[in-house]
Amino acid sequence: MGDEDSKATAMISILHSLWRVLRHTFDRRVTVQYPEERRVMAPRTRGRIVLTLDPDGGERCVGCYLCAAACPVDCIALQATEDETGRRSAEWFRINFSRCIFCGYCEEACPTYAIQLTPDIELGEYHRPNLVYEKEHLLISGPGKYPGYNYYHVAGLSIGGKDKGEAAAERPPVDVRTLLP
Amino acid sequence: MRVKITVDGKSYEVEQGDNLLRACLSNGLDLPYFCWHPILGSVGSCRQCAVKSYQDDDDTEGKIVMACMESSNEGCRISIDDPEAKRFRAQIIEWLMINHPHDCAVCDEGGECHLQDMTVMTGHDSRRYRFTKSTHRNQDLGPFINHEMNRCITCYRCVRYYRDYAGGKDLDAFGVHDRMYFGRQEDGTLESPFSGNLVEVCPTGVFTDKTFKQHYTRKWDLQSTPSVCVHCSLGCNTILGERYGGLRRVLNRYNADVNGYLICDRGRFGYGFVNSDQRISEAGVRIADGCTLESIDSDVAVRRFTSLIKNKESLIGIGSPRASLEANFALRQLVGKENFYSGASAQEFELVATVVDAMRNGSTQTPSLRQIESADAVLLLGEDPTASAPLLSLALRQSTRQQSILEAAKAGIPMWQDAAVRGLAQDSHGPLFIATPAATALDDIASETVRAAPDDVARLGLAVAHELDPKAPRVVKLGARLKLAKRIAAALLAAEQPLVVAGTASGSKAVIQAAAAVATALGVARAKAAAPWLFLTLPECNSMGLALLNAKPLAEIKQQPKGRGGSVIVLENNLYRRAKAEQVDALLDGKTLVVLDHVQHPTVDRARLVLPAATFAETSGTLVNNEGRAQEFHTAVMPTGAIRPSHGWLLSGLTACRPDEKHALSLEDLRAACAAEFPELASTWLSDESPTLRYAKEKVPRASFRASGRTAMHANVSVHEPTPPEDPDSALAFSMEGFRDPDAQLIPSYWAPGWNSVQALSKFQFEVGGPMRGGKPGVRLIQPCKDAPPSYPDEIPAAFAAREGEWLLLPLSRVFGGEELSSMDPAIQVRTSQAQLLLHEDDGLSLGLSEGDIVEIQSEVGSFSLPVAMRKNVCRGVAMLPLDTPGVGFLQLPLYASIRRVSG
Ligand code: SF4
Ligand code: SF4
Ligand code: SF4
Ligand code: SF4
Ligand code: FES
């Protein structure tokens, strides 16, 4: 290709770009006038973390520490406890959102669907301590994204209102003393 | 003999005749297993350790065998990776998991579960079984152990440990196929004082630590620190787990020479005093009214302390057998050696001195606790070790199997063939001869037992000595016991490695001397054979250390120039447990009392100045156990607020009041000064952990690399993460950073890739069950005097004769409630039975008593009342009084007392 040719190509390319930019003047605007206007976030957007309740209204979190272990920035801390019926839960639960990178590993690690990331991404604060959320700030009043699941209905532990043998796919407790084969 | 075996084409050196599973694990190979355990041997019941075994080099087919049931022989060729063997193992796990509950998230075993590890190792990751699961009801097993039966995989380890190994009776296997149940016949506390080991022996979450549950933390979140148990004189090694500044649990820490894989329940569950709200947390000074203690801050406390210790001449320092060697030595530095007194009671002081004398000047060898398991004839004199030194009892129990193990070996059955060896032995045990005033927990396996008062026990011992060596004094008027003495002598003489056990819990110097005499005479009779063993227990965790510092007995304080003024500094000690109240009062009268301690007690209540001291969990130090083994413990929890290690308080006082002299400033300096003054102790701190080397290397992290919550734990206080505390006294760091060297001496917890449970331990041993690759088994400070001429006590105690209307009160040790610190633990308190006066049934009847009656016990030192317990298995004419009985106060036993019924 000659020198002239390449100059012409360059020129065409530039003009083409100019034309495309100009054309955008007549496009529909995509910029949202935040905060007056807000976009609808996809339900799986990874934003502010919540702790959910199971369908029966009990706290889902059983205090297993898996979210804390999965968290790459170690911003979850909690203490497990047990009520008199044997139901385990978090005595306290803290997320330091000023460290959270919203990776969602905690949600993936959670065996009970308790911890969930929500589409709320408005976590701006002037004061870092305001980003430290305790259990009362994290708990919401419903099951979040996973409506049906109740961990205690599949676990073998007996808790108040669910005896041994009453979980999914369980037989009643064995009678050790029977002589039948 | 070492032989070569081939595993997956690679050649390994293993011990001939060892089972292949242990051989593989010893060589660092990963092979899943369940029913096998290093101390329990093989039974081949779980079928998890399947490998392919080939007949010879031409065999391409091979056959599946259970590695734990096959011996290693020269040239044997196996494959772990063989696809068929792998499939077999995956299948076994899948079957085990059929009924397994969906519990990991709420299971205390999670994260340190052998079943989880093995499941991951075999690759079983999704459930194909679509039918229902069987379920089980749990039992309430008391304050120590939580029961969740659904999680059982029927490996039988629990009953094999609890019944076969530890001699427990109240745990068993019930039912058949998927109704198998491991528990008690009915709900109730597990009676064995070794039940806590179920937590570590059970490979699943069926048996877990109930005290840990109350402040549950995953293993990966605990900061673990190597430590030494402070609840008896044996010095078992432990791992302390810390989180949020609290001591969360105690686990066994393997020491091949001391406690091996086990600890007792007192050591495992007795830690509550560290977290107790009864702790002394602030320095205090007693104000004018003499009652109220006013809190003062640390600097003021040091100033006060300094002003009180200015005048060295009028100082008295009282050490403690439960404080570290360093703390005791610091006190000695502060008050001067002429003013340093032992904090032990007069009797304890004498008994400990007798023990030290026997160990140092006798020719007999003191075995390590672990060696005791291989003694094949035992004479136990004067006390029940189950209560005074619990793990010794467990070791003695194993020793009674030794003869049958040797017999089995002759028949070609290796020791690890557990069922076969036990089958061959049937119920035969021993020889184990027990001579004590009351029944012991080892009576069920004793060849012969005799109930006798301490003097008669000593006489029996001396008679045995005389049978063995005619030069030993002859005991006359022994009656029927002469024949017994002859039988004992014959059994000890016939053994390969005889052992004599006694201790200070008998409260009798004569018994200790008699035990030493038997061992000495045995040495003479056996001439060239291996030196016989003599094992003597002591009262407290550092009784030996205190004795080695040459403290003067408390009684000598009287000789101090009389007169008012001067200060008494009491180190971690309640004097009212050591002497009669009047004596203590007389001693403290007119003096200013300074007490350094961590728990409240009557001596603290009298103190003018109280300095809050760190517990064993909050500082580093050294304890010397009953065999003279110095072992270091380390800070597990950083002391908070005003709390400081005792040696820290003492050193600040020392530097402040004598600023122109050169003083130790740190634990290291203190150790150097101590080693310079007591060359015998110098070897304690000589190792490649010595200060210079220690700081050149990277520190060993206490936290696991998976520790969580670093940026949230304290975020409620401040969003700026605090820097981890510095620990200048050890090579451990409060951090997850550092070098996790499996050969390090200070391995704080066991973990290896794929091995999250305690079973990862085998990765840290030279060979399974052998010494640790890096672990430091402690340093033996006392060596026997090999060529000491045999010496025997000159005096033979007179035979005990029951008195009319009077009973000889004797001390009775109790495993729970008989030791000062563990008695403060809430769980231990639940296990502590009410103190009762133990009498022979006929003695009781002669007093017109029936079980449970309240009696008044009256002696020249006062009277008190207790309910009475009447048993057949007690020496006539004596009454056994539990040590540390609330409301009784200090009593120097033995003592004659009259007993009178007060009410029914
Ligand atoms: S989203 Fe990621 S960074 Fe945030 S808490 Fe969960 S695991 Fe931690
Ligand atoms: S993983 Fe889920 S159940 Fe477990 S502690 Fe976290 S939120 Fe609770
Ligand atoms: S025993 Fe192990 S596998 Fe079973 S629920 Fe507990 S942690 Fe999970
Ligand atoms: S309770 Fe534990 S040790 Fe006992 S058989 Fe079941 S899984 Fe094995
Ligand atoms: S470990 Fe070999 S069969 Fe259980």
Image (spheres, coloured by chain):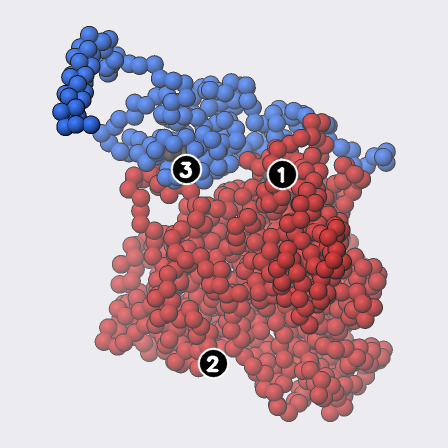
Number of numbered discs overlaid on the protein picture: 3
Residue farthest along the front direction in this orientation: A2
- The residue tagged with tag 1: helix, strand or loop? loop
**Quarter of the view holding residue B662:** bottom left
Task: Give the drawing colour for chain B.
Answer: red
**Quarter of the view holding residue B36:** bottom right
Residue B20's x, y, as percent?
69, 59
Residue A93's x, y, as percent?
42, 33
- The residue tagged with tag 2: helix, strand or loop? helix
- The residue tagged with tag 3: helix, strand or loop? loop
- Give the residue type at disc 3: Cys
Residue beneath disc 1: B124
Residue B705 appears left or right of B30: left
Residue beneath disc 2: B680
Asked if disc 1 and disc 3 are in contact, CB closer than 8 Å, the reply is no
Please tell me which residue is depicted at 43% across the width and 80% down the height of the picture: B678
Residue beneath disc 3: A71
Residue B314 badge: none
The answer to whether mark 3 is within 8 Å of ligand 1 is: yes
Task: Give the drawing colour for chain A.
Answer: blue
Residue mark closest to the camera, 2 vs 3: 3
